[in-house]
Image: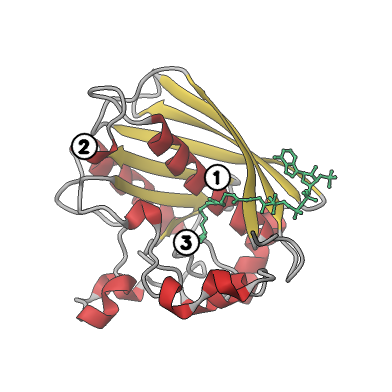
Amino acid sequence: MLRSCAARLRTLGAPRWLPEGWRAPGSEPRAAQRSFSSEEVFHKDYAVPNPSWNKDLRLLFDQFTKKCEDGSWKRLSSYKRGCALRVKDFQTHFLDPKHMKEEQTSKAQLFTRSFDEGLGFEYVMFYSDVEKRMVCLFQGGPHLEGAPGFLHGGAIATIVDTTTGTCAVITGGVVMTANLNINYKRPVPLCSVVVINCQLDKVEGRKIFISCSVQSVDEKTLYSEATSLFVKLEPKSDIKSC
Ligand SMILES: CCCCCCCCCCCC(=O)SCCNC(=O)CCNC(=O)[C@H](O)C(C)(C)COP(=O)(O)OP(=O)(O)OC[C@H]1O[C@@H](n2cnc3c(N)ncnc32)[C@H](O)[C@@H]1OP(=O)(O)O
């Protein structure tokens, strides 16, 4: 399934439902190549190095960027907001339009991109069609503290949901998280870099099962393991408004 969806993305070039910042393989992240006007601030690509990235994150970014040279891996660009086409696509899956009013959505921005540089979620995702997996390189900033000196469990759940969710979107299109199960095995030191490896386990009808691990850069420490269930939505039939 993952292979066929990735192949579809390659063939179509512009799928109707895109994961965060997804661009067709081979296309360039145009927004990352120039400066931004105030109107374009939402179009800045955040999945590139900035001064807050530590040595580990830069090194891994360079390693995965190298892997992208032969096309076997793709970096996913990342913005504060999804593209208009994606929002529109998602709207078609809501029964009640009151949840998507313009005055509400105009202020909306992606949770993980809502922190000042270096304070929250610094991350970049790479996807391999060849290896059929998604990798997220993540540095959790000081405003994500839970236990003193360590990352909040909710922050870990957030980046796990984001990574597995992006993998699910590539696999199934418009999906929502139905279940997220995390085992926290070791605390993650604040401001350290972790590598989140996720893979598609199986697809059963509308259900997409994905699992992932959260490890240290040297792979010696397994911080967390998670399994996720995503359910593929059908237009104007799935989400029950409250
Ligand atoms: C902007 C993005 C950028 C793209 C980048 C994405 C990255 C960000 C990712 C963040 C994603 C989120 O935060 S999403 C936000 C958090 N999630 C939500 O708010 C979802 C709230 N829940 C729902 O809306 C609903 O429950 C759904 C849509 C998940 C499912 O409802 P439904 O469509 O009516 O389907 P339903 O018939 O209930 O279930 C379908 C099948 O799934 C099974 N199933 C359903 N729920 C569960 C469950 N918890 N555990 C086990 N199995 C379950 C059912 O048994 C059934 O199996 P069978 O009988 O067929 O065998």
Picture layout, residue 139 above or below residue 165: above
Task: Work out which residue is located at the far front of the displayed protein and give it.
Answer: 242
Q: CA distance from mark 1 to mark 3?
A: 12 Å
Q: Amino acid at mark 2?
A: Pro
Badge 3 crowding class, 10 Å Cα cut-off, few under 14, some 14 to 19, many 20 or more, is many
Q: Residue at x 42, y 27 (%)?
A: 215
- Quadrant where the C terminus sits is bottom right
Mark 1 and ligand 1: say if the CB distance to the nearest ligand atom is below 8 Å: yes
Q: How is the image coloured?
A: secondary structure
- Mark carried by residue 142: 2
In percent of width and height, residue 97 lies at: 61, 75
Picture layout, residue 70 above or below residue 55: below
Residue highlighted by disc 3? 20
Q: Residue at x 25, y 36 (%)?
A: 56
Between tags 1 and 2, which lies in front? 2
- Mark carried by residue 164: 1
